[in-house]
Amino acid sequence: MKHLVVLSGAGMSAESGIATFRDSGGMWEQYPIEEVATPEGFRRNPQLVLDFYNARRRAAFEAKPNKGHIGLAEMEKDFKVSIITQNVDELHERAGSTNVAHLHGELNKVRSTADPSLIYTLTPGKPDIHIGDKCEKGSQLRPHIVWFGEAVPMIEKAIDTVSAADILVVIGTSLNVYPAASLLNYVKPCTPIYLIDPKEVKTHQQDIHFIQKGASEGVEELRKLLAKV
């Protein structure tokens, strides 16, 4: 069974109503990165940061996987599928994908500010965290998100996964965010690469098969193409 590795970004979940960050009208136009997505921002105004992620978490809990998510999950019937996502929602898992690595953390989880190994999962019935919510060691809880300026703990695992790919699929990412964008450098020579995005994506990578469609239509076309291989 061939190993199909998927690198997904914000465009993967856009059809599910999850706001993107870099597009016109995206999250970064509404909230400065340094205020809500950096350790310094959290130290300056933890209430603002917690409110920001509480709102995003509630929206993510209400969102539903789109046909793109579901299509990738169904491809596990024919491929060994590994998903590396830059997204912090859990829509891949809710669609049925069984092997998902989150590069930038997970929105439905929070962790201790003193001990990063103390991680807790939130539920739709209790989606928020507040000032004063603490771990068992007495430290304030924070979003389990990789903020700008922080290390990406899953990157080594992601490199190993991409290096073992028989087929690489990139969906809904600008390939401008590092270190995620650098993962394409670890693909074995002659590995087929498919890039699904409704917009033109500039990349220095050679021999990419572009599917200029959204996630749902793009995954459907991908499945048809791979059925012929």
Image (cartoon, grey):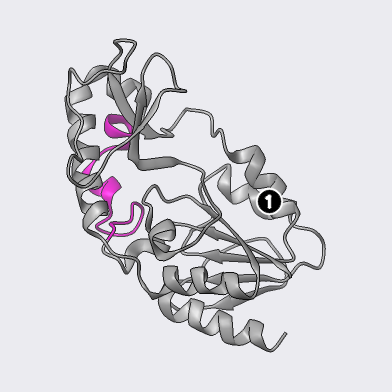
Amino acid at dot 1: Thr
From the viewer's perspective, tell me whether residue 189 is left or right of residue 196: right
With respect to residue 80, does 53 lie above or below? above
Question: Measured from the top left, where is residue 142 in percent x and y?
Answer: 31, 26
Element carrying mark 1:
helix
Q: Count all numbered tags in the image, as a single digit.
A: 1
Where is residue 174 drawn, in percent x and y?
Answer: 49, 58
Q: Mark 1 points at which residue?
A: 161
Q: Give the range drawn in magenta.
A: 18-37
- The quarter of the rendered structure image containing the N terminus is bottom right
Which is nearer the eye, 227 or 51?
227
Q: Quadrant of residue 96?
A: bottom left
Q: How crowded is mark 1: few (under 14 residues within 10 Å), some or many (20 or more)?
A: many
Residue at image coords 25%, 48%: 29
Residue at point 41% right, 65% down? 95
Residue 26 forms part of the magenta stretch: yes
Percent x, y for residue 8? Answer: 50, 59
At x 65%, y 86%, the residue is 227
Q: Is residue 144 part of the magenta span, yes or no?
A: no
Q: Which of 124 and 4 is in front in this view?
A: 124
Spot occupied by residue 228 in the image (x, y as percentages of width and height): 69, 89
Position above or below: 120 against 216: above
* View extreme (right): residue: 189
Q: Is the magenta stretch mostly helix, strand or loop?
A: loop
Of the 4 image quadrants, the one containing the C terminus is bottom right
Q: Nearer the viewer, residue 55 or 69?
A: 69
Give the answer, above or below, for where 116 lies relative to 107.
above
- For the view shown, which residue lies furthest in the top direction? 138
Q: Quarter-wise, where is residue 138 in the image?
A: top left
Residue visible at 69% across and 54% down?
162
Front-most of residues 132 and 163: 132
